[in-house]
Image (tube, grey):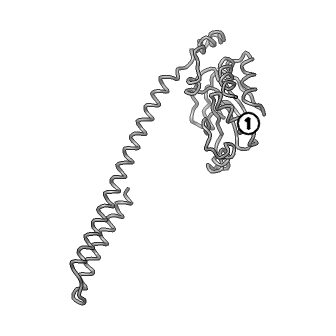
């Protein structure tokens, strides 16, 4: 906006200088002073119009930014209201899996979307067909797919890889970059899958250690359905939630 306003002032100065220069030559040549004044007035009007346009654009950007901020606050309040953590037993007691199942009895697909606890760890180094299947299956199951970072530090390389697996139909949803999750769950090899028993927070520092909740984890070249099925059949802390994600995945498949 500053650049536009400076440009408008610069144009106004040019118009004024043009009038002064032409007027200085009036003693040497016969000029139509009325025409010169008319052109100067037009130049000044153009400069004023440009300045007004810049101000209007700035006001539009301000309103857009304000609306975005308000929308973000509303979404944050909605998340805080809907993403309630599952009741945890006291630290001095063993996990009561029957209680955990009862706590998650009302868990639905909307809740899974609001606070996903099914996390798939991926990399663009994976074969394209395997990455495509992972993104599709995990998204349908209500989970998220995370990458450690940009390949070779290039956002374009990641975008190109994701567009390739999506058939150039746009960037897939439920995909993000979060190296903190790789550190928190000690993921060194991909593909990997994690289902947690509850919500959790990850620390931002490179040296800090996140206190992750009880969870099931699987690493290897397996499908999301296989991982969820294995978790659901087991007696691990992520089993009940894995069953719900598995049902969502199977419902979404034709």
Q: Is residue 243 above or below residue 28?
A: above
Q: Quadrant of residue 194?
A: top right
Which image quarter holds the N terminus? bottom left
Foreground residue among 52 and 188: 52
Which image quarter holds the C terminus? top right
Q: Is residue 98 above or below residue 122?
A: above
Image location of residue 219, percent across then percent down: 75, 31
**Mark 1: secondary structure:** loop
Q: Quadrant of residue 144?
A: top right
Q: Residue furthest right?
A: 221
Q: Residue at x 74, y 22 (%)?
A: 229
Q: Residue at x 37, y 52 (%)?
A: 57
Foreground residue among 75 and 251: 251
Residue 108 seen in the figure: yes
The residue singled out by tag 1 in the image is 190
Q: Quadrant of residue 129?
A: top right
Say whether residue 118 is left or right of residue 114. right
Image location of residue 79, percent across then percent down: 49, 27
């Amino acid at each position: 906006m500053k650049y536009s306003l400076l440009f408008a002032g610069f144009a106004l100065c040019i118009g004024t200088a043009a009038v002064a220069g032409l007027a200085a030559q009036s003693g040497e040549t016969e000029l139509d002073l009325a025409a010169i004044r008319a052109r100067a007035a037009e130049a000044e009007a153009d400069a004023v119009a440009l300045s007004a346009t810049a101000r209007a654009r700035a006001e539009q950007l301000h309103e857009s930014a304000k609306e975005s901020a308000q929308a973000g606050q509303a979404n944050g309040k909605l998340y805080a209201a809907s993403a309630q953590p599952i009741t945890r037993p006291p630290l001095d007691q063993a996990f009561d899996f029957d209680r955990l199942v009862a706590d998650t009895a009302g868990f639905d697909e909307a809740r899974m979307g609001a606070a996903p606890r099914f996390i798939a760890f991926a990399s663009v180094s994976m074969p394209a067909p395997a990455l495509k299947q992972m993104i599709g299956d995990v998204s349908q199951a209500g989970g998220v797919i995370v990458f450690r970072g940009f390949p070779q530090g290039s956002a374009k390389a990641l975008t190109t890889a994701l567009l390739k697996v999506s058939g150039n139909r746009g960037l897939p949803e439920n995909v993000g970059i979060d190296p903190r999750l790789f550190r928190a769950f000690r993921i060194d090899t991909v593909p990997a899958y994690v289902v947690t028993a509850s919500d959790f927070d990850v620390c931002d520092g490179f040296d800090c250690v996140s206190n992750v909740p009880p969870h099931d984890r699987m690493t290897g070249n397996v499908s999301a359905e296989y991982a969820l099925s294995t978790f659901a059949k087991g007696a691990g802390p992520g089993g009940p939630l894995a069953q719900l994600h598995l049902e969502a995945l199977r419902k979404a498949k034709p």
